[in-house]
Amino acid sequence: MSQVFVGMPSLPAYGRGNLFATESFPEAAHHELRNDQLRTNLRHATTTIREKRAHVVGELPDWEELRSAGSAIKEAVMADLPAMLEQFEANFTARGGTIHWARDAEEANRIVEGLIREQDTDEVVKVKSMATQEIGLNEYLDERGIKAFETDLAELIVQLGHDKPSHILVPAIHKNRSQIRDIFLKEMKDVDPNLSNDPRELAMAARAHLRRKFLSAKVAISGANFALADTGTLGVVESEGNGRMCLTLPETLITVMGIEKLLPHAEDLEVFMQLLPRSSTGERMNPYTSFWTGESHDDGPQNVHLVMLDNGRTAALADTYGRSALHCIRCSACMNVCPVYERTGGHAYGSTYPGPIGAILSPLMTGIQAEENNSLPYASSLCGACYDACPVKINIPEILVHLRGEDVDSRRGQRRIPSEMDLMMKGVQWAFSSGQHLGLLEKALPLGRLAAGRDKKIKRLPGHLAGGWTSSRDIPAPPSQSFRDWWVKEHQTPDPGTPGPSTTTGQEK
Amino acid sequence: MEAREEIMDRIRTALADAPAVPDVPRNYRRTADLGPEQVLEMLVDRLEDYKAKVSQVEAADLPRTIAGLLAEATSYVVPHGLPAEWLDNDTLRADDRRLTDAPGHRLTVEDLDGIAVVTSSAVSIAESGTIILDGSPTQGRRAISLVPDHHVCVVPASTVVQLLPEALPRVDPTHPLTWISGPSATSDIELERVEGVHGPRDLDVVIVTDL
Ligand code: SF4
């Protein structure tokens, strides 16, 4: 049962950090679309992963039952979140772990820095984690003289290339093998100068480069895929073994995790460990998964910390329509099926969370009023493929529409004079309110043909909204007569034998 | 206000509409529909798909099989609880290549780097080709199955189940658990799969049909 809170409702506390686009989606998409290599690689990646996923999902006769269970489990977690967090905290702490709470990105970064300093080191190894990317931990530590080494191969490529991830699952997919070799030659001091661009050789170079770090690191930083409330257990799902290295060898382990990652029971893993790998990499199971509960005597880190992060999650939770976005298990299936994402790539979304889920999660966490993110809910054609692919059945299209509504409302609230959209909608309202109004407007149709050139296309409409729409597409010139005019003409002398208009006349001349 | 209390307050405020806690429909498959032989066959198929090398032997042949797999190892580590009879034959008896990791006598990562390791396992799931190690004395602490370069993993047939929901009740979630589904792999460079990144590059699974 969730407790009833009787205090003063406070305003939503929005998230900070890498949740913001640096420019609007249309602007970013515009130049990302010119990046041919990104588009080709991305199409290859999304197509391949999509096919693998379809294959392993098709193998399970109870996939839909698993999705329904996954969705209900997450809904139950959100509805009962305070009790669940308390239960997790009690269990994790009883096993020797320490929990820290962070209201926002800045607070989380400060806590992690403090914990590292206690260990008297200025180097940490890191296993891929979206939460630490969201709070900008690496940059924060770097500014304070602490070096954080990414150990996931793709993250390492991105980090050494001073770059940004373009896909949450294969973050370096925008680089080809020769570019990766060049990055390694330039940035890895100890690398063989004759390194080829063969993926195996490159992977082995990364292994050698990281091995000394793993074997000597005192502190590791991780995220977590799941936290089990009834046992206080944390889990990390991975492929390369860098996760196991980070979670096992250093003395100190600091995990940063969003408050929404909980599952009520250890038993729930039977659902999520079927849903996640098949949806994510399209494998029956990922190569390695590690679970730990506080500290285990004699086995693994003895100094175990967890930073529980809000950073806008409670703001998302407060949105009754949008809160199911917090059910996300970051599998990336929605991205791989999204026609918009496949063309623009992850960079265009700005935030750590790209693709369909990012288009709802980022504005929910930062508030739709955040100007940088208010174009994100429009970065979709509402085709619904993401909803069908989502292992926890998040209805992304519905939330996108809801956020578009919120965006329009919030802009209206900020303006005294009505916006172009308001005026257009008012116009539409007027036109459709009576047949006479519509008839009057239709008389202007031939004018539209004048606006179009010889190629019968209108290249540019006036105004910000309509002009914006035509900046990336042409619209065909309107027909010389309206459907209603045509219908009336066709029916002036109806042939009593043939009801309805003939199908061969009435073509545009 | 302390961060913890403030976040809890924010959550309670966010849930002011008191959303209902739904019942979880657990009508997915939770019991096997295949016989034991088909289940074993499925496990072998899945493991080989992950590029693990799999052999099936009877308990009497286990020591010889393990000795064969270790023939090239310069040295190897075993957890202190590994059944002695698994190694007890002419080749491996009093083998000076053998290191034992035991409470009070822990090997360092330098000792473990690049050698081989022999462990047992707690439970295996055929449908996903997954072997779970739970840190008990036959499997040892996590580092010994991680730092070495070659993992020989023994799977008693009696510990193999078809489905994940059948496996979880057999392990204690508060023990450090490692789920292994093939050797480590990456597809981060142009989606080309490379096996054996970190962790053991070779995984040999020995299924013992009568254990
Ligand atoms: S929204 Fe659904 S499909 Fe998309 S990443 Fe999250 S869990 Fe996966």
Image (cartoon, coloured by chain):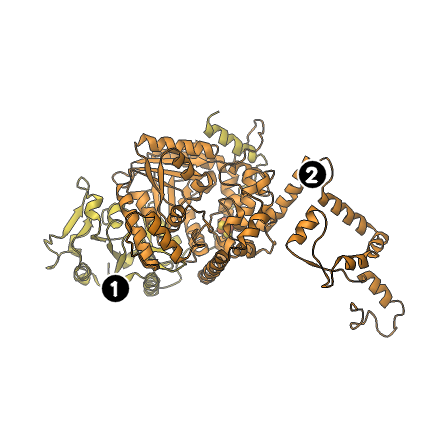
Chain colours: A orange, B yellow
Element carrying mark 1: strand
What chain does mark 2 sit on?
Answer: A
Tell me, yes or no, if residue A378 can be seen here: yes
Is B181 in front, or is B123?
B181
Instruction: Give residue B135's position: percent from left, percent from top.
Output: 27, 46
Kind of element beneath mark 2: helix
Q: Quadrant of the C terminus of chain A?
A: bottom right
- Mark 1 surroundings: few (<14), some (14-19) or many (≥20) residues within 10 A: some
The chain containing the residue under callout 1 comes to B
> In the orientation shown, which residue stands out farthest toward the bottom?
A497
Determine whether, in the image, residue A192 is placed left or right of residue A67: left
Say above or below: A5 vs A340.
above
Q: Is residue B198 visible?
A: no
Q: Residue furthest right?
A: A493
Within 8 Å: ligand 1 and the Cβ of disc 2? no
Q: Give the class, few, some or many, for how many residues have Cα within 10 Å of label 2's Cα (few <14, many ≥20).
A: some
The residue sitting at 71% across, 47% down in the picture is A463
- The three-letter amino acid code for the residue at tag 2 is Arg
How far across and down, in percent of the image, does residue A85 sit?
45, 36
Q: Along the line of sight, which residue is nearer the eye, B138 or A505?
A: A505
**Left or right of B204 in this view: A99:** right
User: Is the C-beta of the residue carrying label 1 under 8 Å from the nearest atom of ligand 1?
Assistant: no
A447 left or right of A352 in image: right
Residue B56 disc label: 1
Residue with the mark numbered 2: A412
On screen, residue B24 above or below A502: above
Q: How many marks?
A: 2
Residue B21 in picture, x, y percent from top left:
53, 42
